[in-house]
Amino acid sequence: MIAAFATGGGTVQGGAIDGAPAPGAGAQTLTVTATIGGLPAAVQYAGPAPGEVNGVMQVNITIPAGVASGSAIPVVISVGGAQSNTVTIAVK
């Protein structure tokens, strides 16, 4: 499993106060999906990053079986159908 941190995730359920620390776990109002190495990856959590400023989204993603090992495996997160830039991770 990996934890990715991003901005631009949209609104969270229950709302959030701009500039305030995120009070705890929550949920994004838009659907969050991910791929790792081009394969669909299960998103275990997508919401505020507790203790970080509101607007930072934490996404916990399970690395799918079958992902090749390597030092530049692409990860893409989508929120409400809009894709993130591609980042890479190392997988052993």
Image (cartoon, rainbow, N blue to C red):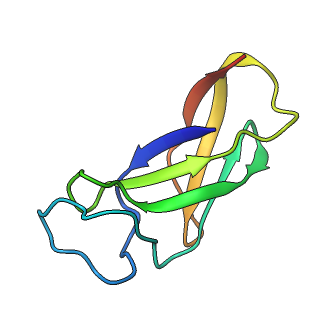
**Residue 67: quarter of image:** top right
Image: 68 above or below 76: above
Along the line of sight, the residue nearer the viewer: 58 or 68: 58
Quarter of the picture containing the N terminus is top right
Q: Please, which residue is most extreme toward the front here?
A: 24
Along the line of sight, the residue nearer the viewer: 21 or 38: 21
**Disc count in the image?**
0
Name the spot of residue 52 as percent of width and height, x first. 24, 51
Image: 81 above or below 59: below
Image: 82 above or below 60: below
Name the spot of residue 88 as percent of width and height, x first. 57, 29
Name the spot of residue 28 as percent of width and height, x first. 45, 72
Image: 5 above or below 16: above
Name the spot of residue 50 as percent of width and height, x first. 31, 55
Quarter of the picture containing the C terminus is top right
Q: Please, which residue is most extreme toward the right here?
A: 66
Q: Residue at 46%, 79% (x, y): give it.
A: 29
Question: Horizontally, is 86 left or right of 7 in the view?
Answer: right
Q: Residue at 65%, 34% (x, y): give it.
A: 74
Question: Horizontally, is 52 left or right of 9 in the view?
Answer: left
Q: Please, which residue is most extreme toward the left here?
A: 19
Q: Residue at 59%, 26% (x, y): give it.
A: 89
Question: Horizontally, is 44 left or right of 29 in the view?
Answer: right
Q: Residue at 62%, 47% (x, y): give it.
A: 61
Along the line of sight, the residue nearer the viewer: 23 or 87: 23
Along the line of sight, the residue nearer the viewer: 90 or 81: 90
